[in-house]
Image (cartoon, grey):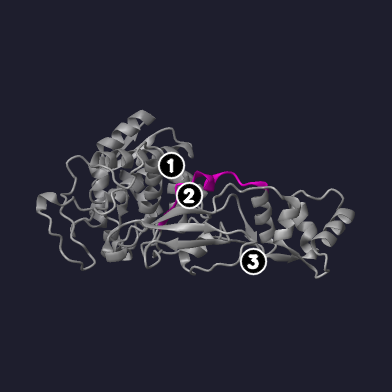
């Protein structure tokens, strides 16, 4: 890796001090991409930190398993199917990173020849009971031995160059045990970074002084997450740039990342005109009151290209939408006036699932999906309150009137 190694370290860890990255922080990142023993399509995370890589990989993995397989029994797959699904997922993320950069080749970071550390069996770190499995039944650990520190890890790496997509897919499959083994998460992350190109990543990051991994707490940055999800290491979660009162805004997130998913393809369909109208209306109603002052009606109509003769037509609409002269325009009559017969195509209810890879965040420390039912209520429906959990508040940024009914006694945790 040579000098390139130093550039990667600087980008990810931001030139650690003379003592390097703390041993405890680095150890949290030295796990591999390992499937849960209790949920065969879910990856397991042992400690906080690497969710910034594991959660995006899990999201792509679920997409491939749910929509690219013929079998409907998506939660129960064989070891060979696990291997095929994971390798296909990793190749797809690498392909995406390459397609959004100026590079025309793929980079795979692996152990230098003859330098692969020995694997050991995994011992739970949370103080849970010891497994009753025999040694030969235990899976290889994703955790490194204590002697594999920050400096030693970076001294035994090598980079492979792959020039075609077909060759990439073959190489990724051949490295399956590497991705599963110790440091597999970091090896894959470094592969994505070098495939994208360090210069390309720096050009996309809003704050180049911010490392991809926080050197104090070990959490991945938004840029790191976006790099894996979209192929672009941008620091925000919207298209283009946004300003608020002259200040550029970034979105902060929980320190842990999880995945919420459903099998309804209509949820990602293009926005309908009525959905666009609802979204625009609500930008003028930031407190979600369900109405706006009638003085803002003209701006809303202009934003939706509904105004042809401003003075006459807007005045007419004010009278029609506010017949009692209260000085407000309600969302429901507004949508019914301009979009009377539009259907969003989204069902009133559909099954949903939540994934949290941390064992300690799951019931009985068993990594399993939490299943529930989502209810997407209309603005005219009576208010139904199921809970006020972070999961629901997050989803309400997309569907303001969504409610969640979980199949378990407790709601899933985002932390």
Question: What is the secondary structure assignment of the residue under circle 2?
Answer: loop
Q: In the displayed structure, does residue 113 sit left or right of residue 302?
A: left
Label 3 belongs to which residue?
288
Question: What is the secondary structure assignment of the residue under circle 3?
Answer: loop
Question: What is the secondary structure assignment of the residue under circle 1?
Answer: helix
- Quadrant for the C terminus in the image: bottom left
Q: Does the magenta stretch include residue 244?
A: no
Q: Nearer the viewer, residue 9 or 228?
A: 228
- Quadrant for the N terminus in the image: top left
Q: Is residue 270 magenta?
A: yes
Q: What stretch is highlighted in magenta?
A: 258-273
Q: Can residue 404 be seen in this view?
A: yes
- Expressed as whole percent of the image width and height from the top left, the position of residue 197 reads 43, 42
> Which mark sits nearer the N-terminus, 2 or 1?
1
The residues tagged by marks 2 and 3 sit, at their Cα atoms, a distance apart of: 32 Å
User: CB of mark 1 within 8 Å of CB of mark 3?
Assistant: no
Please tell me which residue is depicted at 78% across the width and 49% down the height of the picture. 306
């Amino acid at each position: 890796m040579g000098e390139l190694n130093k550039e990667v370290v600087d980008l990810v860890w931001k030139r650690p001090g003379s003592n390097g990255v703390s041993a405890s922080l680095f150890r949290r990142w030295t796990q591999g991409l390992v499937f849960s023993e209790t949920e065969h399509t879910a990856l397991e995370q042992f400690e906080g930190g690497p969710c910034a890589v594991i959660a995006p990989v899990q999201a792509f993995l679920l997409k491939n398993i749910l929509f690219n397989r013929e079998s409907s029994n998506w939660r129960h797959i064989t070891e060979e199917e696990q291997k095929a699904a994971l390798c296909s997922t990793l190749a797809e993320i690498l392909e995406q990173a390459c397609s959004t950069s100026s590079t025309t080749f793929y980079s795979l970071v692996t152990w230098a020849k003859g330098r692969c550390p020995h694997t050991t069996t995994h011992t739970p770190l949370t103080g849970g009971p010891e497994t009753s499995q025999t040694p030969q039944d235990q899976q290889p650990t994703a955790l490194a031995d204590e002697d594999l520190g920050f400096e030693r890890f970076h001294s035994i790496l090598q980079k492979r160059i792959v020039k075609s997509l077909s060759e990439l897919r073959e190489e990724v499959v051949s490295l399956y045990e590497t991705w599963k083994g110790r440091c597999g998460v970091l090896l894959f992350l470094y592969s994505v970074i070098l495939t994208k190109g360090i210069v390309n990543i720096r050009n996309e990051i809003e704050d180049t002084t911010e490392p991809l991994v926080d050197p104090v707490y070990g959490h991945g940055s938004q840029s790191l997450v976006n790099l894996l999800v979209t192929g672009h290491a941008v620091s925000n979660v919207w298209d283009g740039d946004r300003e608020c009162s002259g200040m550029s805004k970034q979105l902060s997130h929980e320190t842990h990342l999880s995945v919420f998913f459903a099998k309804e393809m209509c949820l990602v369909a293009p926005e309908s005109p009525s959905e666009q109208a609802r979204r625009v209306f609500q930008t003028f109603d930031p407190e979600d009151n369900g109405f706006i002052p009638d003085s803002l009606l003209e701006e809303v109509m202009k934003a939706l290209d509904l105004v042809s003769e401003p003075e006459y037509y807007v005045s007419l609409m004010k009278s029609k939408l506010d017949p009692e002269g209260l000085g407000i325009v309600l969302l429901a009559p507004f949508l019914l006036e301009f979009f009377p017969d539009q259907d969003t195509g989204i069902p009133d209810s559909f099954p949903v699932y939540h994934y949290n890879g941390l064992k300690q965040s799951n019931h009985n420390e068993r990594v399993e999906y939490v299943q529930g039912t989502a209810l997407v209520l209309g603005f005219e429906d009576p208010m139904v309150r199921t809970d006020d959990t972070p999961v629901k508040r997050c989803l309400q940024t997309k569907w303001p009137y969504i409610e969640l009914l979980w199949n378990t006694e407790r709601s899933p945790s985002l932390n």
